[in-house]
Every structure is written in structure tokens, then in C-alpha cells.
Amino acid sequence: MAGTPRGTVLIGRDTPERQDVLQLLGEHLADMYATSPPESVHALDPAALAGPGISFWTAREDSRLLGCAALKRVAPGDAEIKSMRTSEAARGRGVASALLRHLLAEARRSGYRRLFLETGSQEFFAPARRLYGRHGFVECPPFADYERDPNSVFMTLRLDAG
């Protein structure tokens, strides 16, 4: 509602297996399969996001889920951003930027030197590509186990120490 004060957005470690997170991740996977061929969907399911080598965070306001994101270790010094998602109600409020800034800070604290991500090439993913570009990500060749795919855009960011 316009003019209604909003609470503070808090970003913290969480589990992808909480009920509200499961619903958000379900919407995420549904959108991925609705916009990309199955072989081009690289989103992880909640069980995989709870697995080893993955750190998972949510953004919440007064305990209401606004978004989520994860970092997956892909090689020594390298991590991949996975499952960046903002709830429909939170879009346009800067939640995705806040989550991304948090991921960048956590990646630096964890000693990662490079971050990678894969997103779609379709128009549906244009806002995500713009967000990543505003934060310094640039297109790159496929990384880790990915292969060239006309439905995918691969991006990277070299992290400084600060």
C-alpha cells in the first residue's frame, strides 16, 4: 500500500526446506521450465540447495520472505550464484540488489576470487542480466560443467579483496 512504512529487510542464513522458501523455489522452477527448454534449465531443487558446498540465504521483512539466493563452490577460489529469486510482492524494491550485494560480501569473506552465474538468454531474463551487469558481471564462456547453449548466458565477476 502506498505510503505504508515498511520494516527492515534482513538477510541471513536459512534453509531451502522451510515451507515459504519451498513455495518461492517452486515458483522459480516453474518459471524456469515455462521459459526454457528442459535441457537448458539449470536451477537446483531445494534438496540440492541444502547440500554440501552450498550456502543459502533469504531476505525477510518482519519474517515475511522477500527473496533468496545461494552460493555454490565450483572450484578452489570460485563460486556460482544459484537460485536468485525475489518474490512477486517484493519486486522493484531493491531486494535483488541487496541480496546480490550480500552474496558479493559473503563471497569475499569466504575467500572466493571469482563468481560465476548462468541465466537465460530469453527476454524474461533481461532484468536479471541488467542487475548483474550493474554490479560488474560480464559475459564469459561456459564454466564448470556447463556447455554452450543458445538459451544460456554465462557471466563472471572477479572479486577484489575489499
Image: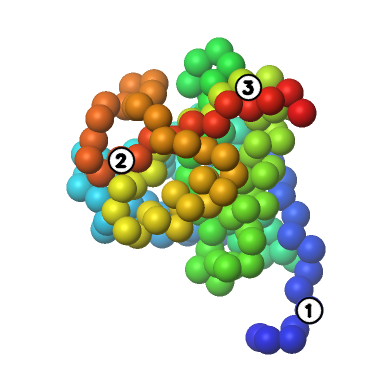
Residue 52 to residue 129: above or below:
above
Which quarter of the picture shows residue 21?
bottom right
User: Which residue occupies 26% across, 58% down?
Assistant: 34
Q: CA distance from mark 1 to mark 3?
A: 37 Å
| Whole-percent x, y for residue 62 in the image | 75, 65
Looking at the image, is mark 1 or mark 2 earlier in the sequence? 1
User: Mark 1: few, some, or many residues within 10 Å (few <14, many ≥20)?
Assistant: few
| Whole-percent x, y for residue 25 in the image | 46, 52
Residue 69 to residue 125: above or below:
above
Q: According to the image, what is the colour scheme of the structure?
A: rainbow
Residue 73's mark? none
Residue 74 visible in the current orientation: yes
Residue 152's mark? 2
Looking at this view, is 99 or 68 the one in front? 99
| Whole-percent x, y for residue 46 in the image | 46, 43
Looking at the image, is mark 2 or mark 3 earlier in the sequence? 3
Residue 5's mark? 1
Which quarter of the picture shows residue 1?
bottom right
Residue 143 to residue 101: above or below:
above
Question: Going by the image, does 36 lie left or right of 107?
Answer: left
Q: Nearer the viewer, mark 1 or mark 2?
A: 2
Which quarter of the picture shows residue 153?
top left
Element under disc 3: loop
| Whole-percent x, y for residue 159 in the image | 63, 27
Amino acid type, residue under disc 2 in the picture: Ser
Question: Going by the image, does 128 lie left or right of 142?
Answer: right
Query: In which quadrant will I find the C terminus?
Result: top right
Looking at the image, is mark 1 or mark 3 earlier in the sequence? 1
User: Which residue occupies 74% across, 60% down?
Assistant: 9
- Give the residue pinned by disc 3: 112
